[in-house]
Image: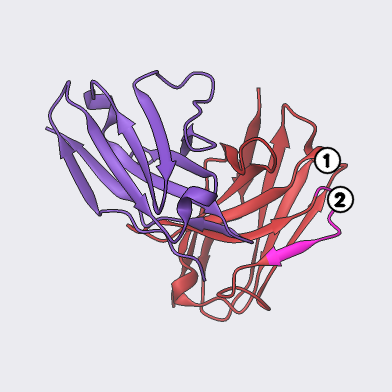
Chain colours: A purple, B red
Amino acid sequence: SYELTQPPSVSVSPGQTASITCSGDKLGDKYVCWYQQRPGQSPVLVIYQDSKRPSGIPERFSGSNSGNTATLTISGTQAMDEADYYCQAWDSSVVFGGGTKLTVL
Amino acid sequence: EVQLVESGGGLVQPGGSLRLSCVASGFSFRDYWMHWVRQAPGKGLAWVSRIKTDGSSTTYADSVKGRFTVSRDNVKNTLYLQLTSLRAEDTAIYYCARWIPSTILGYDYWGQGTLVTVSS
């Protein structure tokens, strides 16, 4: 079965740029979504089709996908961005990455 | 406003059964594929099941195949998940989510989740 791999944790200072990666075999051939999940809350879609932002998602969230790696980038990271982030792709079934805890310190 | 509201979770003994519900509002429920996704305590998201718009097609994760059954009532705008032969490893928050197949290939709305705890 298809697998997506994310780093368990990423740390960033406020105002700096955070990058969270998601790796999978030929992932660049698939569309990737990213979800943000704050503690005690439901996931929220922040990126779809690799790099598109849903309405209401701040411009500081961006995404890319090429080769075997998709990347979620948060520019000018704020304290409110501290959350778990999950990548997701479709490969005859829905596949999630293991999640990355973003710490803003 | 799109809303998905789950209910039906609770404490159940191993081997027991439970039925989860997800009431949808604010959109044309019958036009969307719907999915169940779960999250074990302190763990990541895991896809559980999906159902086609008219209920004619269903798919399950291997871990729940033969034990869980997804269904829907497009008159009541409600999605269901029947859980049977429950195991400790089924303990999780269960979310219903709206699937967007063409433009997103992902979920644009999620419910608040309902907690299922399997324990004696």
Q: Quadrant of the N terminus of chain B?
A: top right
The residue at the point 17 percent across, 20 percent down is A15
| Between A90 and B29, the one nearer to me in the picture | A90
Q: CA distance from mark 2 to mark 1?
A: 7 Å
Q: Which mark is residue B30?
A: 1
Few, some or many residues within 10 Å of mark 1 (<14, 14–19, 20+): some
Q: Residue A69 at x, y = what percent?
A: 37, 50
Q: Earlier in the sequence, mark 2 or mark 1?
A: 1
The residue at the point 67 percent across, 46 percent down is B22
The residue at the point 41 percent across, 55 percent down is A97
The secondary structure making up most of the magenta span is loop
Few, some or many residues within 10 Å of mark 2 (<14, 14–19, 20+): some
Q: Quadrant of residue A82?
A: top left
Is residue B109 one of those drawn in magenta?
A: no
Instruction: Write down the region rendered in magenta.
Output: B53-59
Give the chain letter at badge 2: B
Q: Residue B35 at x, y = what percent?
A: 65, 52
Asked whether residue A5 is in view, the answer is yes
Callout 1: SS: helix
Q: Which mark is residue B54?
A: 2
Callout 2: SS: loop
Work out whether B15 lies above or below B46: below
Q: Which mark is residue B3?
A: none
In this rendering, position of residue A15 left or right of residue A71: left
| Between B115 and B67, the one nearer to me in the picture | B67
